[in-house]
């Protein structure tokens, strides 16, 4: 990254006042603030670590932040997830929208772009190709290996953040200047995850999440300022003992991704459509057979009184019974909550969604 301040960034008196304390820091100053205002980042996953990092980056003055997530705000997110409110959960607001709304409230002068989608080999290149840095807010290794592929292919740095319970790991991956994810995590761990061996719900302590996210955001800040020169250190965080260990990681000189440039995860194109059990939850995600765009408020009028628990332009929550509900997104995708049988989930989707759209049969 160019160490000189971008000439095209204009700082208004209000911005100078807003960031006056930050400008006083020797390594930042006016020049550093201009670099941050011209920077573009994408946060993939708006969960606990993703939103914490996004908030810190917004308050640092990053000029463009794209936030990507497929899910909606649930009440169980609130204790550990920055930015979300009780109202977001009650209205089943998509996480990307809720996150973007809060970031825009923090600083209306930055550009925040919410994207409600599942990140796949089919769309990830479009999501990241115009940014300077990729932020990991995901909760599964499959997506992280996909991020790693696209990072190495396009030379876009990214920050890996892993977390469970009191513990976390942070690693800055800068293509060509240090190890990549494939160098440090054995693929057999991913194979366990794909078999369902790693689908148990893990606990999380919000103070430890904040600690891990702060380390990641600090690395992002230093990189965007052009003062980060260490791409070999894995930060291992013990939030219970308040310990941070630095582990030096060397590049695997036979790495299939960053050395041989075989992008096996990115090559798995062809969007998966159908019913998929969501790892770590009692829910099934339905991806419709064809792309669609729904007016949910109009669609809600076709249901019996009392069946619609909440509706907005992004999502509609449909009550099936005391245990099962359907969260329908405006692109036709749905999460059947309270069900883990994929075939049964499809039956509910046909009955409560396709039939109401006149597409059943």
Image (cartoon, rainbow, N blue to C red):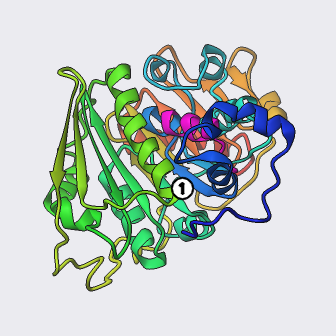
Q: Residue at x 52, y 35 (%)?
A: 51
**Figure check: 304 above or below 10:** above
Q: Position of residue 41 (x, y in %)?
A: 58, 55
Answer with the quarter of the image where residue 241 lies: top left
The boundaries of the magenta stretch are: 52-63
How would you classify the magenta stretch by its main secondary structure?
helix
On screen, 42 above or below 218?
A: below
Residue at x 43% of width, y 40% of height:
284
Query: Is residue 339 at all visible to an observer of this figure?
Result: yes
- Tell me which residue sits at (47%, 57%) in the image: 223
Is residue 53 covered in magenta?
Answer: yes
Return the residue at label 1. Answer: 225
The spot of residue 352 in percent (x, y) is 63, 35
Taking the image as shown, residue 77 lies to the left or right of residue 3, namely: left
Left or right: residue 299 versus residue 95 is right
Up the image or down, 182 lies above or below 321; here it is below
Determine whether, in the image, residue 49 is placed left or right of residue 106. Answer: left
Is residue 328 among what the camera can see? Answer: no
Q: 84 or 208, which is in the foreground?
A: 208
Q: Position of residue 194 (x, y in %)?
A: 25, 54
Quadrant of the image occupied by residue 144: bottom left
Q: Nearer the viewer, residue 98 or 251?
A: 251
């Amino acid at each position: 990254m160019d160490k000189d301040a971008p000439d095209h960034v204009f700082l208004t008196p209000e911005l100078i006042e807003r960031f006056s304390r930050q400008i006083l820091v020797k390594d930042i100053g006016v020049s550093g603030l201009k670099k941050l205002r011209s920077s573009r980042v994408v946060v993939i996953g708006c969960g606990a670590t993703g939103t914490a990092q996004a908030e810190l980056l917004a308050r640092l003055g990053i000029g463009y932040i794209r936030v990507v997530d497929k899910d909606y705000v649930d009440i169980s997110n609130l204790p550990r997830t920055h930015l979300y409110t009780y109202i977001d959960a009650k209205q089943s607001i998509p996480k990307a929208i809720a996150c973007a709304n809060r970031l825009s409230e923090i600083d209306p002068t930055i550009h925040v772009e919410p994207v409600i989608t599942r990140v796949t080999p089919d769309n990830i290149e479009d999501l990241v190709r115009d940014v300077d840095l990729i932020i990991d807010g995901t909760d599964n290794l499959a997506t992280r290996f996909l991020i790693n592929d696209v990072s190495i292919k396009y030379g876009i740095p990214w920050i890996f953040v892993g977390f469970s319970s009191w513990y976390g790991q942070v690693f800055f991956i800068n293509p060509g200047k240090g190890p990549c994810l494939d160098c440090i995590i054995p693929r057999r761990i991913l194979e366990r995850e794909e078999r369902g061996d790693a689908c148990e719900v893990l606990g999380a302590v919000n103070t430890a999440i904040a600690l891990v996210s702060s380390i990641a955001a600090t690395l992002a800040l230093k990189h965007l300022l052009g003062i980060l020169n260490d791409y070999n250190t894995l930060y291992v965080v013990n939030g219970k003992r308040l310990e941070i260990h630095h582990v030096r990681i060397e590049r695997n000189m036979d790495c299939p991704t960053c050395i041989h440039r075989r992008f096996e995860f990115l090559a798995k194109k062809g969007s998966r459509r159908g019913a998929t059990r969501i790892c770590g939850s009692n829910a099934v995600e339905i991806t419709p057979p064809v792309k669609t765009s729904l007016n949910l408020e109009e669609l809600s009028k076709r249901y019996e009184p009392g069946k619609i628990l909440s509706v907005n332009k992004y999502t509609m929550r449909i009550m099936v019974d005391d245990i099962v509900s359907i969260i329908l997104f405006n692109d036709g995708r749905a999460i059947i909550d309270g069900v883990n049988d994929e075939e049964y989930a499809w039956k509910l989707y046909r009955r409560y969604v396709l039939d109401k759209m006149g597409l059943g049969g």
